[in-house]
Image (cartoon, rainbow, N blue to C red):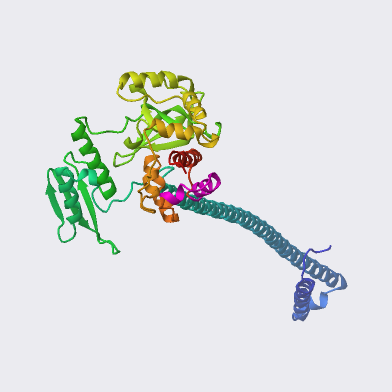
Amino acid sequence: MVLAGDDDEGYAQLIFGAYESADLQVRKADSLPQTGAAASELSDKQRLRLAEKQEKRERKALVKAQQQAEAEAARAARRLEKEAKESEKLAKRVAREAERAAKEAEKEAERAAKEAEKQTAKGAKQVERAAGKAEKQTAKKAESAAEQEARRKGAGDHAPRLPQHSELAEDLRDDEEAVAVWNAAMTVSRQVPEIEVMGWRLYAIERKTEGEKTFDTYYQEPDGRRHRSRSVLHKVLERRVASRRSGAPIWQPPALGSMVQVYIQDETMAEHEFEWRAAKVLRTDKSGIFFQVVVFTRNGEPDPEFLEWYSDAEEGNEWRPTAALGHSAGSSRDSDEAAGAAAAKSTPAEAPQPRRSELHASATKRQLPASAEASEAKRAATGGGCSMTASTPPGSLTVRELLRRFRLEQYCQVLDDLGYDDLRYLLQLDRTTLAEIADMASMKHGHKAKFVDWTLAEQYACGL
């Protein structure tokens, strides 16, 4: 019989012990004292039986030992099988743990990748926002620079600058209110912070920031409107004095959204061609001195790129109320005759504004130079004459006075800064030089044509 087991040495010791036990019993039996006749009567058969018994006992002991060894081997096998199963379970558990750890690592890697992608996208958005912000700031700076340039030129999005006044104009010095308010405006300061005169309130407020000017002055009208500029104050006084002298209400700009007509030139017209064109009032400046319009095309559509500023100084010359003339809001080239007739009917004491065809015919009869024909007619229609006489001292007249007469006073300061302040010198220049001066002053196209043509007409009127 082959015994199962993994310890051959132990099994041999077990068998050897069984045989030794059986041999020991036989020897004990043999060593028993043989007494009396029993001992003598022992025969070979008895000895053989005893030997067989002994062999049976030994065989039985051997079988028992073998059974015990087999049982022990079976237990060892079961134990090994159990340990193998536990090892297999452990291996499976380790494999599951490893798989779970791999999945967790994969998920963590995915989360890290998503987070990195999110951070990258966030960084890209931040960079994009920063770039957009920088672009907006750059555009804002450029727009601010453009606005400052437009303000310097007196055009664009800001109203033109009024001329500076260091003293009250001579034609206002006989008006009690104008003199009193102007003197108070010149007096108010940090030492005299507030003055009230004839319903006006003039006061100074100290600045919180340091600088060359330590206070701001305000000029409040009797109706509560407040101004900060001395130039605006002078213009307001001019209007109030004119109202008292004429008995008419104080001039107010046209209502927002109302239609007016403006005398303009655009890029579709010839070099010396002007016409009345419909325009719509968009807004007024804070002081109420100027109002801005959008000029309509000949097709009756507003041109958002064609914006102009006007004031009461240009009324009847550069612009006129549409309602007062009974004019339509379309292109006014074909309706100048009707507008002129309406104007003549409404103001019979004044000469009507000639139409362009009449101006051209008149200039041709007088044999004016072709470059100055419309300008001379326009100048004559507005009642102008030569700015100089034979007794005029050289250099006593200024370009500023001529520009005010031409309704181009927004360029006064620019030309003055360029050194063109002598009218006698200006009236000696030719067309090319005048055009170059207009370009240096950054005049708009229509204003440039007006400046050149009207100056040449002035030269003709003065016989130069």
Q: Which residues are magenta?
A: 423-440
Q: How many marks?
A: 0
Q: Position of residue 81 (x, y in %)?
A: 71, 59
Quick one: 17 or 23, which is closer to the camera? 17
Q: Nearer the viewer, residue 278 or 175?
A: 175
Q: Residue at x 19, y 52 (%)?
A: 185
Answer whether residue 377 is magenta in the image.
no
- The rendered magenta stretch, by its main secondary structure, is classed as helix
Quarter in which the N terminus is drawn = bottom right
Pick the residue in front: 381 or 109: 381
Q: Does residue 70 sit above or below 318 in this rendering?
A: below
Residue drawn 21% across and 29% down?
248
Question: In which quarter of the view is residue 123 placed?
Answer: bottom right
40 relative to 316 in the view: left or right:
right
Q: Is residue 229 visible?
A: no
Magenta segment includes 439: yes
Q: Position of residue 406 (x, y in %)?
A: 40, 39
Q: Position of residue 93 (x, y in %)?
A: 64, 57
Drawn side of residue 113 relative to residue 57, left or right? left
Vertical relation: 109 (above or below) 339: below
Residue 151 vs residue 313, the one in the foreground: 313
Q: Is residue 193 above or below residue 201?
A: below
Task: Mark yes or no: residue 277 visible.
Answer: yes
Looking at the image, which residue sits at the far right?
44
- 336 sits to left or right of 243: right
User: Which percent across, then down, holds residue 357?
Assistant: 49, 24
